[in-house]
Image (cartoon, grey):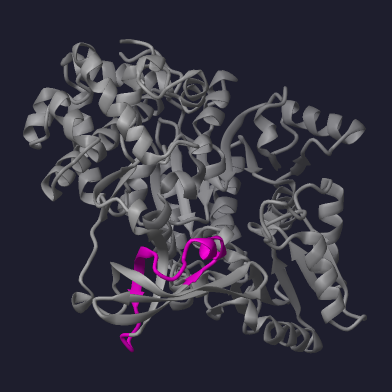
């Protein structure tokens, strides 16, 4: 049996669906492991603990009623008799269940018992006949149910026994007490006990973390091959620049600067990640390094992910560096004609010391006189592929990657193992913590009054929405409707404008310039303002439908306010609070970006936070680098053993890792 269609239940249409999801053979099918497991057990009401999840089975004694509370929010209620007691059950946004939750129906509710012992807030409701007990694999394969997928896998297993290929070297598998592949496959798709669950979960996580570790080691090997001459810079000019700054560098800024300067002196290419919270002063550190490189008679380039941010960097760095003789230029796809020709000629001849633009800088046919240093802002948007383009152009500048999505140092080393790490945790003196409140949409009247109050005091406000235009798939806030709504809620003299990424660079720049000048009081925007926008007079931010964003992204957005001397406030608005979500609570507890990013990684994994396509960081099927940190450290240590082993499985892993990063030489 080789074809997918030979499994009972897989016809031509299902085969096409499987292929679209990357399953082309029976081996692919059985190696599509569960991404999680759910343990379904019906509990005892007498054992229920207030606030802790439990599943209860009972009979409906009052049919479901639905109340429409407000936009996108419904409440379904019914009475359920469980073990002789009547529970008042509430479930949100499940109005479609009204037709089946009738008096006399037997159902299972999963949720939390309230402190009065009568009210029960459910997260899930199923008819008893549909409820499956036991340890159930969760595959999340598009448009195919978990139960159906598991059935197909079990049907295919006997046919592929002869084709199995061990994916973990035996010496490591035995060292960690992991089952061999045939035994693993027998239980991974149908675990019977908690012990089974622990065994297969550990093997899945270890295998993907080990592969990740080998890939990181391969990237490190590639980088270590690149040799560049040490830079001889003018330290006196650098010291004069630092002394001329209107503030003193923080201890972390000084440490990061020293680490970068030590790299510049080495006969190898610098590959350093400079990570720090929003507003921690990473750009000043980069500016100091740029000046040093220019005094060494080499050129520098700074690349940003958006034209808005690139323009702002150009303005700030020109003001900082031009008094010290640094000749700067801006270049993007929007720079045309004679101006463009002059910049390109200046880079080739060496009359331009620093060019600032978007990542398209490396994709255009630009020649540098002597490019010695490249700064990449928001490094998670500039990944392995872009670095390879630089190498293919014959350019091996020292590279500084900056990220305002900070993560704990040990985890950063694990995730960006091919980079050295510098972290800025201390904030500049004088910054006030931003007051933060997570609330639901019932608070919007109060929020609008606060916006008006701030405008009366001469301040400005951001309103962040997830959508550019209205979608038929969701009722989430969009730019057009939100602009109209806030114009109607605020006095006519209050200027409200919209901003989004589909606008031309000229339009975006014009609106941001008007907002920075104070001509616009309320800026309704998508996340185009997430990085780089600096308007100290903006003291209030409202993020609508904040459940559509990650925690790190929300923290970045929050960093757009509180950049001046006045107290700033941020509201994160979501009706998910009424559904029992406490996901955003950490944003109220702390403004520490490192802690917030760690929680974001815990909840979502690195692929979602950083973008797996850009960085090469995988979206792990089951492992989470925060939750499984100890196992990750073990796998990273084992990856070093793999790199030096002659074991055939090890050699295959190395070859596959190099193939993934488009390198074939493993010597």
As for residue 523 lying within the magenta part, the answer is no
Residue 558 vertical position relative to residue 628 in the rendered view, above or below: below
The stretch in magenta equals 91-117
Taking the image as drawn, is residue 31 in sight? no
Rendering coords of residue 610 (x, y %): 49, 46
Residue shown at 78%/60% (left/top)? Answer: 479
Rendering coords of residue 560 (x, y %): 64, 67
Residue shown at 31%/85% (left/top)? Answer: 117
Where residue 603 sits, quadrant-wise, is: bottom left
For the N terminus, the quadrant is top left
Q: Is residue 290 left or right of residue 206?
A: right
Residue 105 vertical position relative to residue 156 in the rendered view, above or below: below
For the C terminus, the quadrant is top left
Rendering coords of residue 375 (x, y %): 57, 43
Where residue 162 sits, quadrant-wise, is: top left
As for residue 98 lying within the magenta part, the answer is yes
Rendering coords of residue 301 (x, y %): 64, 39
Q: Nearer the viewer, residue 425 or 373?
A: 425
Q: Nearer the viewer, residue 184 or 231?
A: 184
Residue 79 vertical position relative to residue 474 in the rendered view, above or below: below
Residue shown at 73%/52% (left/top)? Answer: 471
Q: Is residue 659 left or right of residue 133?
A: right
């Amino acid at each position: 049996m080789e074809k997918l269609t030979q499994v009972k239940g897989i016809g031509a249409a299902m085969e096409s669906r499987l292929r679209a999801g990357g399953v082309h053979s029976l081996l692919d099918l059985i190696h599509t492991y569960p991404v999680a497991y759910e343990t379904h057990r019906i509990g005892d009401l007498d054992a229920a603990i207030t606030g802790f999840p439990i599943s209860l089975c009972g009979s409906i004694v009052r049919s479901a009623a639905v109340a429409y509370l407000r936009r996108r929010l419904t409440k379904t209620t019914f009475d359920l008799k469980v073990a002789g007691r009547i529970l008042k059950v509430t479930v949100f946004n499940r109005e479609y269940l009204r037709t089946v939750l009738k008096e006399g129906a037997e159902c299972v509710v999963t949720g939390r018992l309230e402190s009065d012992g009568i009210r029960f807030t459910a997260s899930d409701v199923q008819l008893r006949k549909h409820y499956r007990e036991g340890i159930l694999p969760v595959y999340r394969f598009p448009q195919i149910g978990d139960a159906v997928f598991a059935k197909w896998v079990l049907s295919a297993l006997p046919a592929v026994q002869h084709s199995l290929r061990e994916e973990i070297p035996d010496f490591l598998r035995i060292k960690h007490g992991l089952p061999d592949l045939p035994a693993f496959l027998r239980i991974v798709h149908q675990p019977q006990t908690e012990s089974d669950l622990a065994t297969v979960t550990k093997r899945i996580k270890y295998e993907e973390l080990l592969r990740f570790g080998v890939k990181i080691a391969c990237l490190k090997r590639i980088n270590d091959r690149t040799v560049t001459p040490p830079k001889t810079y003018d330290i006196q000019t650098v010291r004069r620049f630092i002394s001329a700054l209107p503030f003193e560098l923080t201890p972390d800024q000084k440490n990061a600067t020293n680490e970068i300067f030590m790299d510049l002196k080495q006969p190898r290419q610098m590959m350093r990640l400079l990570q720090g919270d929003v507003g921690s002063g990473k750009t000043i550190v980069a500016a100091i390094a740029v000046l040093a490189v220019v005094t060494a008679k080499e050129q520098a380039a700074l690349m940003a992910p958006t034209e808005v941010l690139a323009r702002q960097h150009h303005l700030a760095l020109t003001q900082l560096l031009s008094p010290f003789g640094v000749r700067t230029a801006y270049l993007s796809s929007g720079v045309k004609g004679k101006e463009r020709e002059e910049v390109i000629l200046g880079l080739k001849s060496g009359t331009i010391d620093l060019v600032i633009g978007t990542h398209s800088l490396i994709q255009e046919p630009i020649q540098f006189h002597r490019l010695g240093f490249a700064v990449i802002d928001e490094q998670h948007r500039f990944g392995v592929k872009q670095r390879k383009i630089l190498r293919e152009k014959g350019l091996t500048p020292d590279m500084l990657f900056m990220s305002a999505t900070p993560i704990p140092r040990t985890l950063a080393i694990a995730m960006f193992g091919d980079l050295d790490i510098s972290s800025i945790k201390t904030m500049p003196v004088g910054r006030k913590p931003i007051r933060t409140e997570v609330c639901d949409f019932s608070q919007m009247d109060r929020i609008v009054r606060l916006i008006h109050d701030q405008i009366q005091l001469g301040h400005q406000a951001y309103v962040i929405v997830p959508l550019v235009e209205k979608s038929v798939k969701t009722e989430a806030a969009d730019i057009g409707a939100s602009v109209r709504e806030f114009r109607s809620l605020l006095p006519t003299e209050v200027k409200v404008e919209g901003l989004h990424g589909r606008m031309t660079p000229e339009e975006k720049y014009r609106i941001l310039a008007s907002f920075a000048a104070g001509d616009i009081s309320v800026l309704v925007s998508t996340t185009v303002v997430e990085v780089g926008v600096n308007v100290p007079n903006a003291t209030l931010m409202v993020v609508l439908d904040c459940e559509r964003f990650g925690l790190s992204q929300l923290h970045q957005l929050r960093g757009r306010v509180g950049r001046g001397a006045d107290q700033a406030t941020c509201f994160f608005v979501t009706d998910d609070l009424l559904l029992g979500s406490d996901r955003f609570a950490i944003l109220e507890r702390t403004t520490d970006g490192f802690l917030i990013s760690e929680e974001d990684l815990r909840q979502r994994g690195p692929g979602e936070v950083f973008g797996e396509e850009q960085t090469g960081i995988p979206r792990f099927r089951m492992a989470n680098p925060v939750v499984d940190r100890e196992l990750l450290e073990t796998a990273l240590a084992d990856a070093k053993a793999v790199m030096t082993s002659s074991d055939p499985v090890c050699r295959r892993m190395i070859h596959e890792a190099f193939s993934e990063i488009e390198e074939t030489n493993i010597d």
